[in-house]
Image (tube, helix red, strand yellow):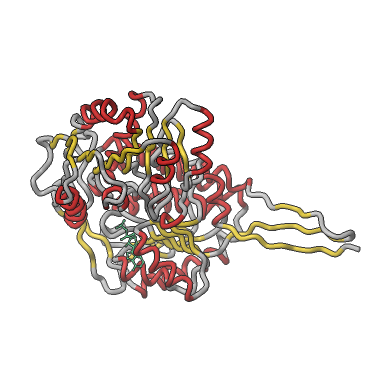
Amino acid sequence: MGSNEMLIGGKWQSAVSRDTIPMYSPSDGKEIGHIARGTAVDVDKAVAAARRAFDGAWGNMAALERGRLMSRLAALILDHHEELAQIEAADTGKPLTQARTDVTVCARYFEFYGGAADKLHGETIPYLNGYQVIILREPRGVTGHIIPWNYPISMFGRTLGPALAAGNTSVLKPAEEACLGIMRLAEIATEAGFPDGVINVVTGYGEEAGAALSVHRGIDFISFTGSPEIGTLVQTAAARNHIPCMLELGGKSPQIIFEDVNYEAAIEAVIKAIVQNAGQTCSAGSRVLLQRSIYESFMRSLSQRFSRVRVGSHTADLDCGAVISRQQKQRVESFLHGARDSGLEVVATGMLDKSADPNGYFVTPTLFGLVPEGNDLAREEVFGPVLAVVPFDDETDALRIANGTDFGLVCGIWTENGARQMRMAKRVKAGQVFINSYGAGGGVELPFGGVKKSGHGREKGLEALREFTVAKTVVFNHG
Ligand code: ADP
C-alpha cells in the first residue's frame, strides 16, 4: 500500500485524479500522512469490482469458508494489535488505552460475525395443504458503507462484519478526517486472503466520494453512520434509486438518576460515558437527568470526580484526548459560549495536562448544572466533553424530559427499584436501555441503533446480520 492509495478490486491504486488529502494528528496539528482523494470515477470502479466479486468468488464461496476468512482476519488484527492502536490514537487523538480497546472490539466483530456466517438460517412456513413455503435469507448484493471519524477501526468491524458474513461484497467510504487505521486494516484483510473486490475502500471527501456512493445505481444497500444532516442527504440520494438504507445518526442520550442510586457506580459510569473519546461518541451519555431530592449531594460527588478528569495527548494516555479537528473544537466551544451566555452554571471542569500541545485541538471537559430542559445544551448533540445536568421531580417528569428531544439512541436508568426499572425501560424511547450501567460503545453482541432522529436499522448483534440480508419467499406446490 502506498500512503496515497485506495483498495479497489484487490489492487492498491491512486485516485484517478491523482489528488490527495493531507491528514493531521489532532494531538498536535502535525501532518501524519495523506489519503487519496477519490471521486465518482473511483467509486464506479470500486462498485464494479464489488459486483464482480459478488457474482464470482465471494458469491460462490460456502458460508463456512467466508466465516473462516473472517476469523483469520480477527486473528491477524490481534497480531497487529499494538501497531493498529498506535495508528488509531495518532489519527483520532484518542488516548492509547481507548484506541487499544477499539482494536480489540474490531477483532471481536470479525470473531462474532465470522462464527455467525454459517448459522444464518432461513425459515419454513406452514401454508395451504399441498404446499411448502421456504424463506431464503439472501445477501443484498453490493453494500455501500459510509462511516465517520470517531471510531474508524471499530466501525470497520461493526459495518463490514455483518455485511460480509451475510455474503455481501462492499465499498467502504471512511471519513476524510481519520482513516489511516482503516487503510492498514484493509491491507491486513488482503493478507487474510479475502478475494479481490470483496472489500473495497474509497477514500475522499464526503461531498465527492461519499455523495457518489450514496447516489450510485450499482449498490443494493447503504449503511451510513454520521450526522443527521448528512444522513438525510444520503437517504434522499439513495431513495432516488430505491436503494434501502440504514442510518445511525447520534443522540442526546440521558442517564436518569433516581434518588435510590448507588452513587459510586453511577458517577464512574456518568463520567466515562461523556469523557470517552472526548464525548465524540454517538451514544455518549451527554445529559444527566437527576432527581431533585438528591441534586445537591450527588452533584457534590460528581463535580469532585469530574474535576479530576485529565485531558492531554494520546501518547500521555489520560482520560480524554483532543477532539478531531479545529472545526470540531470551534463547534464545541460555540456550545460552551452559548451556555455561558444563557447564564448556565459551570459546576466543574477537567484539567488540561502539560502534554496538551497548544497546536492540538483540546477542549476542557465541562459540567453544567441546573440546565433547563429547553436549553440547547439539553437538546442538541454537542459531540464534545460537555455534560448537562437537568433536574427532575418524579418518574413522570423524568420520562417526559428523557423523551423530549428529537433523538432516541441510548438511555441509562439508575435505580434499585425493580418495578421502576421495568416501567422506565418500557417507556423510554431509545434503541438501547441500560439499567444500573451504561455501555457506550460496548458489546458487539448487542443490537444498537436509534429511533426518531437517531436513525433506523440496527447495527451489531444478530440483528445487523439480518439487516444485510433480504428475505426471498419460495412457494412449492407439491400437490
Ligand atoms: P460527522 O459529524 O461525524 O463529521 P458527517 O455526517 O459529516 O459526520 O460525516 C460522516 C461520513 O459521511 C463521512 O465519511 C463523510 O465523509 C461522509 N459525508 C459527508 N458529506 C457527505 C455527502 N454529502 N454524501 C455522502 N457522504 C458524506
Locate residue 130, reporting x and y percent. 89, 60
Ligand 1 quadrant?
A: bottom left
Q: Is residue 395 above or below residue 67?
A: above
- Given residues 422 and 77, the one toward you in this image is 422
Locate residue 289, reporting x and y percent. 35, 38
Locate residue 477, reporting x and y percent. 85, 64
Residue at the location (52% across, 28% down)? 418
Q: Quadrant of residue 173?
A: bottom left
Q: Is residue 221 above or below residue 96?
A: below
Residue at the location (24% across, 43% down)? 385
Q: Is residue 291 left or right of residue 31?
A: right
Q: Is residue 408 above or below residue 238?
A: above
- Given residues 187 and 270, the one toward you in this image is 270
Q: Is residue 456 visible?
A: yes
Q: Is residue 32 visible?
A: no
Residue at the location (50% across, 32% down)? 420
Locate residue 104, reporting x and y percent. 39, 38
Q: Is residue 228 left or right of residue 142?
A: left
Q: Is residue 68 left or right of residue 46?
A: right
- Given residues 321 and 405, the one toward you in this image is 405
Q: Which image quadrant: the N terminus?
A: bottom left
Q: Which image quadrant: the C terminus?
A: bottom right
In this figure, what is the number of numbered marks?
0
Most extreme residue toward the right is 479
- Given residues 305 and 42, the one toward you in this image is 305
Residue at the location (38% across, 69% down)? 233
